């Protein structure tokens, strides 16, 4: 093998965010942007000589080109083998599954997840460790440090691998095995859920489902699992052809961007024109899920709580749950379930990488985020199709509607009214100043009454990992009110244009007679308070959020 050492220079701004490095496709397309980052990943790892690397992505524009570059660099750096999904496709949870099942050293996932794709869209790349999970901050910071001092990258001269053909070939002596993108993940999911019972429900003719793959990576997974294995009618899966630009859409499963699904789930017609019983959507890389009942959207924080409360109905979790975890901005609905079950509930910073240690240590079984991510210890990523199957399994056993199950949950545990307001593409300087201003006022806020509300606590969330003791600071501004309500402010770490301000609003309502209020109305006083505290309108020039979830 002829390794080629190519001189290069550090490129500024290659620090991974909440979930890997995300930039415009046009940025990644300019050598040596991708090469520098990939070499910096390899330079931050030890002991991979001769070992296996998993590579795959969400199929977005530039995915195939980037994979060929990575294969040559993996060979030059001394990996023994690469497992790559057919056509370069692996959903994020499937990649996690493949890393674990094949005891790989780690994996590189190419995705900008819920960000739009195409030649003018976004691209992304992240490294997952041998447990199948996103690299912890210790590694992402080491990668970043390497990007700042890189002087060369290693590659080989070799032809492209045919990613369409299953089987093994070589790149400069390194084995490359093209694997079925779906098989391993589907097999794992079949071992957790009651496929017979779910299949019977989907084939019954009296239950209709609509899964919206949003022209993203879950298309092939949904076809194989829902249609082929479970026998759902073909019409149960829409937008299932994965496209490099996601059909021009924004593959973020929320009521604003999943328009097709929302139109169907809120349809007023009758018979086959009526709204299906169950709707769901996933995102670009298949790790998120949105759950919708007939004319009823399930808030992701509630969905996590409902799955936890009903987990023992599902074969894979029939033995009970070890513990639960949620990201800090996620509502405390799941905390109430943990309390009732007498198990621990951990509060972690935003991003799946913070769940890894708790899952590895066997301290938690289920975890989730308000951003439509739910998962368990079956892999080390959030898993969209898994969450949909979990809901289907519960629906098949309980025989009630989605809405009835959620309303019943509120009756038992109380309702955590919850909403997130996103202000996208805000001027970065203005967004940073807004957060800085809040940070400076933290010490003076407790005890003060603003817009009629008494503030009980105010801090900038810091987290000490209970397993390895690592500390993460500045993870979001939390304002707690005397009545238990809460507002959280943080800036997104996944965007590529300007800044995205996220404002998370939460109010607990124990009284079942007050569970039917429209969410934004129920949170109106908090929305006003958020503006009064942070000066959102004044500082960003925005009168309303870009997206409300
Ligand atoms: C967002 C979500 C966070 C999620 C992350 C990656 O991060 O808020 O909960 O883990 O995206 O999800 P941020 O920093 O933009 O708020 V995915 O599906 O885009 O990989
Ligand atoms: Co995603």
Image (spheres, helix red, strand yellow):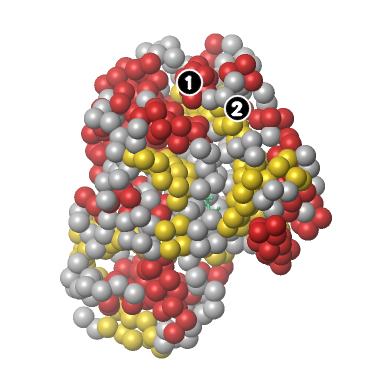
Residue 107 occupies quadrant: bottom left
* Residue 330 pos. (x, y %): 52, 42
Marks counted in the figure total 2
* Residue 471 pos. (x, y %): 43, 63
**Along the polypeptide, which appears first: circle 2 or circle 1?**
1
The residue nearer to you, when weighing 33 against 159, is 33
Image quarter in which the N terminus is found = bottom left
User: In this rendering, is residue 339 above or below 529?
Assistant: above
User: In this rendering, is residue 434 above or below 521?
Assistant: below
Q: Determine which residue is flagged by label 2.
A: 509
Is there any visible trace of residue 231 in the rendered image? no
Q: Residues within 10 Å of mark 1 (few under 14, many from 20)?
A: few
User: In this rendering, is residue 112 above or below 388?
Assistant: below
Q: Secondary structure at mark 1?
A: helix
Q: Secondary structure at mark 2?
A: strand
Is there any visible trace of residue 340 in the rendered image? yes
Left or right of residue 38: residue 49: left
* Residue in the image at 59% along x and 55% along y: 459
Q: Determine which residue is flagged by label 1.
A: 412
């Amino acid at each position: 093998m002829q390794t080629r050492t190519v001189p290069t220079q550090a490129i500024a701004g290659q620090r991974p965010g909440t979930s890997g490095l995300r930039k415009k496709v046009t940025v990644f397309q300019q050598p040596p942007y991708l090469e520098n980052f990939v070499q910096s990943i390899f330079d931050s790892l030890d002991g991979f000589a001769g070992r296996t690397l998993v590579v795959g992505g969400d199929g977005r524009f530039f995915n195939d080109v980037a994979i060929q570059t990575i294969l040559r660099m993996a060979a030059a750096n001394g990996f023994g083998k690469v497992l790559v999904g057919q056509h370069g496709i692996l959903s994020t949870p499937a990649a996690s599954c493949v890393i674990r099942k094949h005891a790989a050293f780690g994996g590189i996932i190419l995705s900008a997840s819920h960000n739009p794709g195409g030649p003018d869209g976004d691209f992304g790349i992240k490294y997952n460790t041998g447990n199948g999970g996103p690299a912890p901050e210790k590694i992402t910071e080491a990668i970043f440090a390497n990007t700042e001092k890189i002087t060369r990258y290693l590659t080989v001269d070799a032809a492209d691998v045919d990613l369409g053909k299953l089987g093994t070939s070589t790149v400069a002596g390194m084995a490359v095995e093209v694997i079925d993108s779906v098989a391993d993940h589907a097999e794992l999911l079949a071992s957790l859920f009651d496929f017979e019972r779910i299949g019977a429900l989907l084939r019954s003719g009296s239950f209709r489902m609509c899964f919206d793959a949003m022209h993203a990576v879950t298309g092939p997974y949904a076809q194989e699992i829902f249609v082929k294995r479970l026998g759902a009618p073909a019409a149960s899966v829409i937008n299932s052809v994965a496209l490099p630009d996601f059909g021009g859409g924004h593959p973020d499963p929320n009521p604003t961007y999943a328009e097709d699904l929302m139109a169907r789930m809120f349809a007023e017609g009758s018979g086959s024109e009526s709204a299906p019983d169950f709707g769901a959507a996933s995102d670009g890389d298949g790790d998120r899920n949105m759950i919708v009942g007939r004319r009823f959207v399930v808030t992701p924080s509630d969905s996590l709580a409902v799955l936890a409360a009903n987990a023992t109905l599902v074969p894979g979790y029939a033995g009970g749950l070890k513990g639960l975890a949620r990201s800090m901005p996620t509502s405390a609905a799941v905390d109430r379930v943990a309390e009732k079950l007498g198990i621990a509930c951990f509060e972690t910073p935003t991003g799946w990488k913070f769940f890894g240690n708790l899952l590895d240590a066997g301290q938690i079984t289920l975890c989730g985020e308000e951003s439509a991510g739910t998962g368990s210890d079956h892999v080390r990523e959030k898993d969209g199709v898994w969450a949909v199957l979990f809901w289907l399994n519960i629906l098949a056993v309980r025989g009630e509607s989605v809405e009835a199950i959620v309303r019943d949950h509120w009756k038992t545990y109380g309702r955590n009214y919850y909403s997130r307001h996103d202000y996208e593409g805000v001027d970065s300087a203005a967004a940073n100043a807004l957060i800085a201003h809040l940070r400076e006022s933290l010490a003076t806020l407790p005890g003060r009454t603003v817009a009629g509300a008494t503030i009980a606590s105010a801090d900038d969330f810091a987290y000490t990992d209970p397993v390895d003791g690592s500390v993460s600071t500045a993870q979001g501004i939390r304002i707690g009110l005397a009545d238990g309500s809460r507002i959280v402010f943080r800036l997104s770490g996944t965007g590529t244009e300007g800044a995205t301000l996220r404002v998370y609003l939460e109010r607990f309502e124990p009284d079942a007679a007050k569970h039917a209020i429209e969410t934004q109305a129920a949170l109106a006083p908090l929305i006003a308070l958020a503006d009064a505290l942070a000066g959102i309108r004044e500082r960003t020039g925005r009168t309303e959020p870009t997206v409300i979830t």
